[in-house]
Image (cartoon, rainbow, N blue to C red):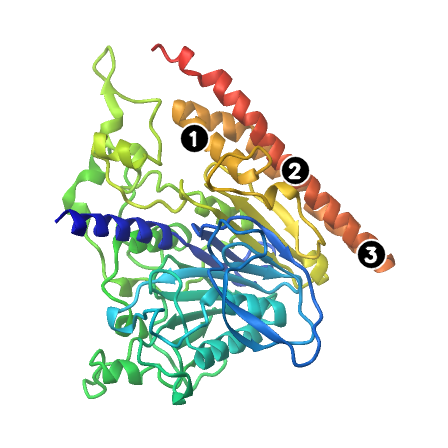
Amino acid sequence: MKTILSTLLIIIGTYSHVLACTVIAIGKKASADGSVIVSHTDAGPDCRLNLVPAQQFNAGTKAPVYWGMIESGRPLGDYGEVIGHIPQVEETYSYFQTAYPQINSKQLAIGESTLSQRPELMVDRSICEQIMTIEQAQAFALQRCTKAEDALKLITGLLETYGFLPSCIDESESLVIADTEDIWVLEVFSVGNDWKKDSGQPGCIWAAQRVPDDHAMIIPNWSIIKQIDIEDKDNFCASTNYKQVAIDRGWYNPDSGKPFIWQEAYSPIPREWSTSRFWLFYATFAPNHTNWPDRFSESVWEGENQYTQYVEPISIYPFSVKPEKKMSVQDVMAFQRSTFKGTIYDKENASAWYYPDEEGQLTKSAFTTPFPTKEMRRVMNINSRRNVARARGEYGMVAQLRSWLPDEIGGVYWFYVDNAYTSAYVPIYTGVTDIAECYKVYNPEYYQDNSIRWTVDFVDNLMYLRWQDAHKVVLKKREPLEARFFAEQEMVDEKAQSLLQKNPKKAKAYITQITIDRMNEVHQLFKELKLDLISEFTNNKQGI
């Protein structure tokens, strides 16, 4: 019994790490400034930011295929065990790599979100022939492609040819692949342990759908593709086995008279950690699209009412939607920082945080946090529902892709580490040649003062001294800094573009230096916040 319980706890802990990636994408006609926007939050272990340079190779060279790219604990740029090779190209583009590769110098960006899949499709690496993880396919695409559609073709070709090998506890994957014009959603499921490379059969099951230019969408660790019109090649494409596998396994009966629904065929029954994010996104940005469930509430007890805790059919949530007002980079950042405040999922509003004051009125404790630790939840009997923001998050980004500017300047990679709720976004131009050292450093085993990840995490931990007041201290310093980055963007764009026309080398030097300066400024801000918080909220002032 003890062994079974230990195994279950390990599985639950792994799922909390894996199923923590939210992707949001906004078409160019749905964004406030006309850019294409794609974002990604991740709890992948390696939060270090590595700018992989453009490279040249001799004809006939082979490119290694790695296992373990998402893991930490190795030197920067060491991506783990080589488990195969594919033909190399003669020239590659520079791109940014964390646990997952995300954006290149040509304004091609990719967001990733792990999906659940049926157990029958899962693979065992010790016995299967598949070698291509989704993160490795992403890296190859960012090295070799400039357009979303080309990246889609390359990634699916690699997965079919070499076999899709899930790296996240055997689950499936989704990618949002975007350039300055188009956004494509790709969903990939594995095919089990019996696949053979020389079988002539695809090494995965996949489908892809284009997001309309005036739409926005979310992937909260769940499949969103529904019906597939394979004849509409401008908006859909899929592997040759996309329907047949479901028929062969009895998940779809073509004689039933019912349409084939991809989402129903390959995804199991939805979980609340996905439907809650679906609900929040669509209820926020398209509140009148349909009659969404009403989960907005300020009641202290509503979140504990079992009769409000149903899981609605996943079918009510669309693939994408036209937002009721155009969305900005700041809107995406705000969503990434969401803790479901003002809803039944708000962990800050649990009754356990409240106590009667001298006059008998309920008062919220200053210790109240939207991120109660496991021990706090056990002691206070607070539910463990997932926020959008993650206290155990590792990094995230919002990629802003602007067609009216040269690639060196048009791509802006708004990047943060640790918890989005606490951390600060820093704009990184995709044409830079280097980044600040503090974003390249992170040893998860021991604190490092020269690591932005550790510094933000230090502040995040200090906030638990008196969370309600400490968060105000953080906002007071963080919000003006981020506001200034946005306010300066037009000026920096203009100067960089002027330099680019005269001297491309000086233009790159300029955007590189201003990016490094800003990254160091964020690091310095959190170093100061450490001192501010311990000075203001030290235990010596807590009335102990």
Question: 331 or 144, which lies in front?
Answer: 144
In percent of width and height, residue 146 lies at: 63, 70
Q: Are marks 3 and 2 in contact (CB under 8 Å)?
A: no
Q: Position of residue 189 (x, y in %)?
A: 35, 72
Question: What label does residue 461 carry, if any?
Answer: 1
Disc 1/disc 3 C-alpha distance (Å): 42 Å
Look at mark 2 in the image and give the residue it sits on: 520
Give the structural element (helix, strand or loop) at label 1: helix
User: Which label's residue is closer to the chain start, 1 or 3?
Assistant: 1
Callout 2 touching callout 1 (CB < 8 Å) = no
User: Is 458 positioned to the left or the right of 368 in the image?
Assistant: right
Q: Classify mark 1: residues with Cα within 10 Å, few (<14), some (14-19) or many (20+).
A: few
The residue located at (53%, 21%) in the rendering is: 532
Disc 3 residue type (three-letter): Lys
Q: Residue 274 sits in which quadrant?
A: bottom left
| Disc 2 secondary structure class | helix
Let me know if residue 417 appears in the view.
yes
Q: Which mark is residue 505?
A: 3
Disc 2 crowd rating (10 Å Cα; few below 14, some 14-19, many 20+) is some
Amino acid type indicated by mark 1: Asn
Which of these two is toward me, 291 or 426? 426
Q: Which label's residue is closer to the chain start, 3 or 2?
A: 3
Name which residue type carries label 2: Asn
Q: Quadrant of the C terminus?
A: top left
Asked if the residues shown at circle 1 and circle 3 are in contact, with their CB atoms under 8 angstroms apart, the answer is no
Left-right relation of 83 to 204: right
Please report the residue visible at 41 percent of the width from the left and 11 percent of the height from the top. 540
The numbered disc on residue 251 is none
Q: Position of residue 20 (x, y in %)?
A: 38, 52
